[in-house]
Amino acid sequence: MPLRIGLGHDTHRTGAGGPLILGGISIDCDFHLVGHSDADVLLHAITDALLSGAGLPDIGELFPDNAAENRGRDSGDMLRLAWAKVRENGWDLVNLDCVILAQRPKLSPHKAQIRQRIADLLQISPDQIGLKGKTGESVGEIGRGETLQSIVVALLERP
Ligand code: MG
């Protein structure tokens, strides 16, 4: 059975005032992520991991950040459309492994809800999704809270 891995990475800078949209959910927080869409750094990295594994154009090519229709766009909507393209190319998902790099907020209270949201968007089981939060140990741009980043690996199979 053919297998492929895809790697996705994304960065967004923080701006004053919440809420924080992360992993498809809204989190009470005193900052938000700045971007053309809703700036959901985790969903963007997942989208790119899936597209990349299937050898398809990346999120920036599918949803250009200078296009009016993508302004403030729900990243869950972009993920669903990208996943449909990956599926049309014959790929199923074995699992996703996700890292969120964020000094704040503490992610553990939100992990179950984020995993469920991603599972709903992709029509998979939450146990196919690994999710870890890592701080920046108070150093660098992540540690100073200037950015949130995400790294995602997707394993695809073609049954
Ligand atoms: Mg992005």
Image: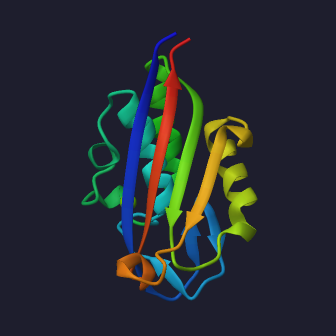
Q: Quadrant of residue 147?
A: bottom left
Residue 16 falls left or right of residue 30: left
Between 32 and 95, the one lying in front of the other is 95
Res 114 seen here: yes
Residue 113 location, x and y as percent? 73, 59
Residue 119 location, x and y as percent? 68, 43
Res 73 seen here: no
Between 158 and 153, the one lying in front of the other is 153
Q: Quadrant of residue 114?
A: bottom right
Residue at left 51%, top 73%? 102
Residue 151 location, x and y as percent? 44, 53
Work out whether 139 lies above or below 84: below
Work out whether 107 lies above or below 53: below
Work out whether 138 lies above or below 58: below
Residue 104 falls left or right of residue 124: left
Q: Quadrant of residue 7?
A: top left
Residue at left 47%, top 42%? 153
Between 59 and 3, the one lying in front of the other is 3
Residue at left 64%, top 43%? 129
Residue 146 location, x and y as percent? 38, 82
Quarter of the rendered structure image containing ligand 1: bottom left
Q: Check the picture and name the quadrant holding the C terminus.
A: top right
